[in-house]
Image: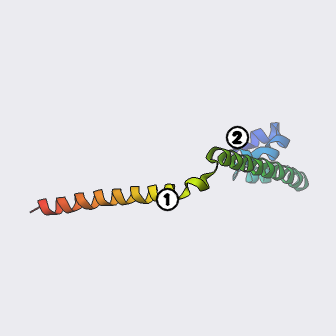
Amino acid sequence: MDRILVKLERHQTLLILGFRFLYGLRSVTPFAIGMSDVSWLRFSLLNLIGAGIWAICFGLAGYYFGQAVEAFVGDIKQYELELIASVIGFGTLLWLVHWYRRRRSAHSTP
């Protein structure tokens, strides 16, 4: 909390705008700002701007990540049935191996 108050004295505007992007400080920083002499109007305005920047950045990141995944995966519909059959087959194989080992160990134990 003390470290945040020191940073708040030096970089008040940047800290209020960007605390959402700082992992671990996101939940503590508003309390430190509330304990400081920052006016509620200044905090509210900068917090609103920071929230808008954060929402736009993460929204665009999600959109572009989705576009990249779609481009990478491509036309997955063509391979959907084969993929599902492979997953089911692999799961069945694992279950059979587990069942066989369990049965074998049950018979070998007196």
Amino acid type at image mark 1: Ile
Determine which residue is flagged by label 1: 84
Q: Residue furthest top?
A: 10
- Mark 2 or mark 1, which has the lower sequence index? 2
In what element is the residue under mark 2?
helix
| Mark 1 surroundings within 10 Å by alpha-carbon count, few (fewer than 14), some (14 through 19), many (20 or more) | few
Q: x, y (%) of residue 71?
A: 67, 45
Drawn side of residue 66 relative to residue 105, left or right: right
Residue 3 shows which numbered tag? 2
Residue at position x 50%, y 55% from top? 83
Residue at position x 14%, y 63% from top? 107
Q: x, y (%) of residue 25?
A: 69, 47
Q: Residue furthest front?
A: 78
Drawn side of residue 20 relative to residue 46, left or right: left
Q: x, y (%) of residue 30?
A: 76, 53
Drawn side of residue 104 relative to residue 57, left or right: left
3D distance between C-alphas at marks 2 and 1: 52 Å
The answer to which of 39 and 75 lies nearer the viewer is 75
The answer to which of 16 and 57 lies nearer the viewer is 57
Q: x, y (%) of residue 87?
A: 45, 56
In what element is the residue under mark 1?
helix
Question: How many labels were placed on the picture?
Answer: 2
The answer to which of 17 and 106 lies nearer the viewer is 106
Amino acid type at image mark 2: Arg
Q: Quadrant of residue 21?
A: top right
Drawn side of residue 107 relative to residue 34, left or right: left
Residue at position x 67%, y 49% from top? 70
